[in-house]
Amino acid sequence: MRGHAERLNGLGTTIFAEMSALAVATGSVNLGQGFPDTDGPDSLLEDAIAAIRAGANQYPPGRGIAPLRQAIVDHQKRFYDLSYDPDTQVLVTTGATEAIAAALLAFVEPGDEVIALEPYYDSYAAGIAFAGGRRIPITLRAPSYRLDLDELRAAITPRTKVLLINTPHNPTGTVLTDLELRGIRDLAVEHDLVVITDEVYEHLVYDDHRHIPLATYDGMAGRTVSIGSAGKTFSVTGWKIGWVTGSPDVVTAVTTAKQFLTYVSGSPFQPAVANALALGNDYFDGIRATLQSRRDLLANGLSDLGFEVHRPAGTYFITTDIRPLGHTDGIDFCRLLPERTGVVAIPTQVFYDNKEAGRPLVRWAFCKQEALLQEALTRLQKL
Ligand code: PMP
Ligand code: GLN
């Protein structure tokens, strides 16, 4: 048989699968792949069980069931004062991952350049490759991991079609500021670019930082593909219910691609997520407060162990520099860490094209119960 297509070259096995398998094989505390070790609210879980018993087990409508589309519209209005029509401006997807892939397939022609913030979530590289696009990274540099708008401007060429933005940003925890978002808007309008914005960590923002959706800026409504997901907000990463909002043309284009990827998404989870999106502010404030205190626990502990710690403004990941501990390469460090200490982390380098910028960086997930974070810190004392 002849070999696989070139578009798979370099994709290998995702680091998350590799590191979670290593965690299981070595009995390690897994602070690698980002998934919570407690499930979402009871009402959410019960609603999905009830939906299965009530027969929500066949194909739902292609764009998602009407109550979920309405709940997404209400959520965008309530938190951001954004208005959408539930029939033409919302699409339910199989997680944000499918939304990203479908959006790239919908807008990228072979040879088009897609500018993405580096380090980037690994499915971006695959999605761009599947669409035949060229990935152009803009590096968020240590120690602040801020976006350099001059660098972004300089990266735009006549072949640039899409800006792929992620805020709050995995893995650095950067939450883009109003100034940075305005800068992105100005460049997108000036160069007539499509902006795909992955905002799955929208509710996981700490201290006095604030998430501002790109779609709220003048000039963005017609060119923005906004992506959300229930996975992070409601601690159900395995349910894979995500969504896209945007102009009717944008949503139709993404739907056209999505219908031939999965056709439809998770029937019994849709009514449950619809109800969860309408939970009171106490839920959204609660998850933020819980995660903020876990961030502080892990950040302080890693700092006491000697790592240089970047305290994230959002997401549930902490990036550390391992050089103060005498190490230089995060991949070597993370491969040996389970055996040496019984803890798994992710080498951030794998999310960079510019490998040097990420070489000494390691990512730790803090969406875990406090006792487990404490256990990880105790184990890491062996370093
Ligand atoms: N985008 C980012 C930045 C992520 O970290 C993740 C995490 N898994 C996803 C998208 C994927 O979300 P989902 O599980 O809803 O596909
Ligand atoms: N988004 C999660 C992370 O960054 C996990 C995603 C995955 O396993 N594909 O760790």
Image (cartoon, grey):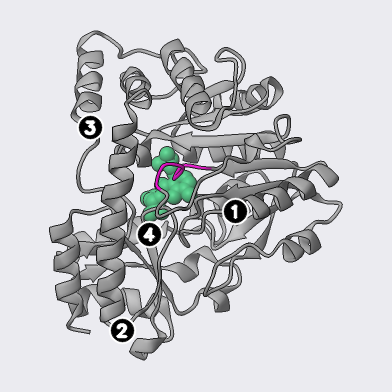
Q: Secondary structure at mark 4?
A: strand
Q: Which mark is residue 306?
A: 2
Q: Amino acid at mark 1?
A: Thr
Q: Residue at x 48, y 18 (%)?
A: 69
Distance from label 4 to label 2 (Cα)?
Answer: 18 Å
Sequence-earlier tag: 4 or 2: 2
x and y percentages locating residue 235 in the rendered image: 29, 40
Q: Secondary structure at mark 2?
A: loop
Q: Amino acid at mark 3?
A: Pro
Question: Looking at the image, can residue 186 be seen?
Answer: yes
Distance from label 2 to label 1 (Cα)?
Answer: 30 Å
Q: Residue at x 24, y 64 (%)?
A: 297
Name the residue that disc number 1 marks: 177
Q: Amino acid at mark 4?
A: Phe
Sequence-earlier tag: 4 or 3: 3
**What secondary structure predominates along the stretch shown in magenta?**
loop
Sequence-earlier tag: 2 or 1: 1
Name the residue that disc number 4 marks: 317
Image vertical order of residue 314 relative to residue 43, above or below: below
User: Are discs 2 and 1 less than 8 Å apart at CB?
Assistant: no
User: Are discs 4 and 2 less than 8 Å apart at CB?
Assistant: no
Q: Circle 3: is it few (<14), some (14-19), or many (20+) Cα within 10 Å?
A: some
Relative side of 272 to 119, left or right: left
Relative side of 301 to 372, left or right: right
Distance from label 4 to label 1 (Cα)?
Answer: 19 Å
Sequence-earlier tag: 1 or 3: 3
Q: Quadrant of the C terminus?
A: bottom left
